[in-house]
């Protein structure tokens, strides 16, 4: 049987994410509470800033608040 203390001793991935400078697109999607596919579309469209590191696509952490600010400044679309 597994030691119940092992569950609480495991590092919390959400709090570990807070120290990162560059996020994967999946991590950015999780922080924005949107789907992975939607986040990839926003990154590829240039709506969310991203950088390449070698062959990897990464999202700077400060790009997420910038994206949300941009959304808040857009006029509400007519329904």
Image: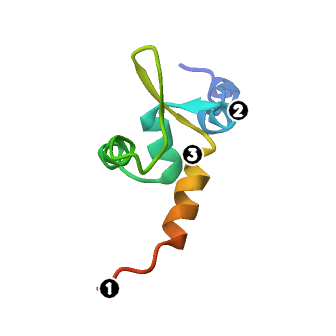
Q: Is residue 78 left or right of residue 59?
A: left
Q: Are marks 2 and 3 in contact (CB under 8 Å)?
A: no
Q: Residue at x 61, y 39 (%)?
A: 14
Q: Nearer the viewer, residue 23 or 63?
A: 63
First along the sequence among labels 1 and 3: 3
Q: Which mark is residue 66?
A: none
The residue beneath circle 3 is 63
Indicate the position of residue 3 as horizontal and vertical percent values: 62, 21
Q: Residue at x 50, y 52 (%)?
A: 32
Secondary structure of residue under mark 2? loop
The residue beneath circle 1 is 78
Say above or below: 2 vs 28: above
Q: Nearer the viewer, mark 2 or mark 3?
A: 3
Query: What's the CA distance linking mark 2 and mark 3?
Result: 15 Å
First along the sequence among labels 2 and 3: 2
First along the sequence among labels 2 and 1: 2
Q: Residue furthest top?
A: 54
Image quarter (top left, top right, bottom left or bottom right) of the C terminus: bottom left
CA neighbours of label 1 inside 10 A, class few (<14), some (14 to 19), many (20+): few
Q: Are marks 1 and 3 in contact (CB under 8 Å)?
A: no
The residue beneath circle 2 is 19
Q: Is residue 45 left or right of residue 31?
A: left
Q: Is residue 71 left or right of residue 22?
A: left
CA neighbours of label 2 inside 10 A, class few (<14), some (14 to 19), many (20+): few
Query: What's the CA distance linking mark 2 and mark 1?
Result: 39 Å
CA neighbours of label 3 inside 10 A, class few (<14), some (14 to 19), many (20+): some
Where residue 44 sits, quadrant-wise, is: top left
Q: Residue at x 63, y 44 (%)?
A: 62
């Amino acid at each position: 049987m597994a030691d119940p203390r092992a569950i609480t001793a495991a590092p919390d991935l959400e709090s570990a994410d807070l120290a990162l400078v560059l996020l994967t697109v999946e991590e950015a999607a999780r922080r924005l509470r949107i789907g992975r596919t939607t986040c990839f579309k926003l990154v590829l469209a240039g709506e969310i800033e991203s950088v390449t590191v070698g062959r990897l696509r990464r999202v700077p952490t400060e790009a997420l608040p910038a994206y949300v600010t941009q959304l808040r400044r857009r006029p509400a679309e007519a329904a």
